[in-house]
Image (tube, helix red, strand yellow):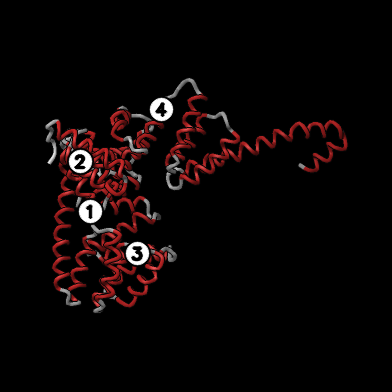
Amino acid sequence: MLSRLAHAFRRRPWTTAVALVLLLPLATAGAFHFYALRQWHLAQQALLKSPAEADARLRTCLKLWPWDVSTHLLAARAARLNADFSRAEALLNYCLKLTPNNRDPIQLEFLLLRVQTGELNEVEEPLLNCVENGHPESLVILETLAGAYMRNLRYAPALNVLNQWIRLEPNSAQPYQQRAWLLERASDQQAALRDYRKAVQLAPNEVAPRLRLAELLLQENETAEAVPHLELLYKRHPERHDVIARLGQCRLLQGRADEARQLLETAVQAMPDDALVLVSLARLDIQEGKASQAEKWLRHLLQLDRSDTEGQYLLVQALRLQGRMQEAEAAQLQYNQLQELLKRVNILLRDVVERHPNDPEPASEAGRGLLRLGQDRLGLYWLHEALRRDARHQASHQALADYYQEKDPEKATYHRQQLAASTKAGISSGR
């Protein structure tokens, strides 16, 4: 090629030079186009696992293709998945300016954005209708709805959309993994194990489903099955502290206390708030008669999550070993109450709330229970859901007024005013 170019220069130097000058911009433009196309494909691959990476790559594409609607639309989706909602909305509005026709994909992305920003109740019906009618973006719709339902512990609709997702995409590990997570919270551990095993089978190189499968196997005392999963993960990822932690937990259950302590104490340096690490260290200390040290781990755990039943149970043991019987009895009573409350909240969320979509009381009771368990975000969600069902529900206004009394006095005042107004009107829709 170079020899031909040299020969052309010798024969027609001016003509060749002019041709090169004319061709150079085209070649440069072609190179930039190829680069942008490469970034586009890499962004599509990264969209679900790393939306931040997808967003960064698509910013390059937008500079080179500023008028391309599909690029702006994909960038909006990446921003939405990266929780950059203001950027997603701005990109979608720009899409509307770019195209006067075929706005359906843009409107769909607006609906999905509303789901992620907390307007699930307002848009779930049209989105489910899209899936029912075979919309080409059904998988994206189901994935978005599943995430929103699970974040709010809406068991029944979450299970419904995950089942639909699996029917449409039976060889994808993600819906099996998410359904397993849901089944755990519905106290169906064996079904959860089946789904985690399926997720591992479909995505053998993914860490998350294999690690959670091993954790659940340890929880169910299926240590022998958990061991190969954890040893494989440790071989592949010896630097990961979550893997080190779970292997330490496994070694503890195998009776290999010295190895367990070494692994757990390594993990706790990087994961000081990990519940399973704290519980395992407390168990190890109780076994070795170090009850006061076990108590320290457990107090820290319960400060982080007062609804941790295993931590509360072990605290009772640690106090008894120290001869502090009165405190142990009080901790035992708290443990019993916690167990009952958790059981009641799970029953409400799994079996009652969705079956009575117009009754505010089950949603309100679930919300009040979640607040008592320290699950503030979920508790507030369900209390507001109760008020959506009945704007004058007294028990919900009372719970919200009490919750906001110190955190946000203005909101507390509002709910007390609503409570007073409903009482004055003789409304008694709550307990």
The Cα–Cα distance between marks 1 and 3, rounded to whole angstroms, is: 31 Å
Q: Amino acid at mark 1?
A: Leu
**Mark toward the viewer: 3 or 4:** 4
According to the image, label 4 marks what residue?
107
Question: In the shown orientation, is residue 155 left or right of residue 66?
Answer: left
Where does label 3 land, which residue? 230
Identify which amino acid the numbered label 4 is placed on. Gln
Residue under numbered circle 1: 373
Residue 232 appears in the rendering:
no
Please, what secondary structure does the residue beneath circle 1 have?
loop
Q: Amino acid at mark 2?
A: Ser
- Other residues around mark 4 within 10 Å, as few (<14) / some (14–19) / many (≥20): some
- The residue positioned 53% from the left and 39% from the top of the image is 58
- Spatial CA distance of label 4 from label 2 is 34 Å
Pair 2/3: label in front? 2
Of labels 1 and 3, earlier in sequence is 3
Looking at the picture, which amino acid does disc 3 mark? Answer: Leu
Q: Earlier in the sequence, mark 4 or mark 2?
A: 4
Q: Is residue 9 left or right of residue 76?
A: right
Which structural element holds mark 2? helix
What residue appears at the point 37 percent right and 67 percent down from the top-left corner?
268
Decide: marks 1, 3 in contact (CB < 8 A)? no
Depth check, front residue: 6 or 79: 79
Query: What's the CA distance linking mark 3 and mark 4?
Result: 45 Å
The reply to whether discs 1 and 4 touch (Cβ–Cβ < 8 Å) is: no
Q: Which residue in the protein does label 2 denote?
A: 396
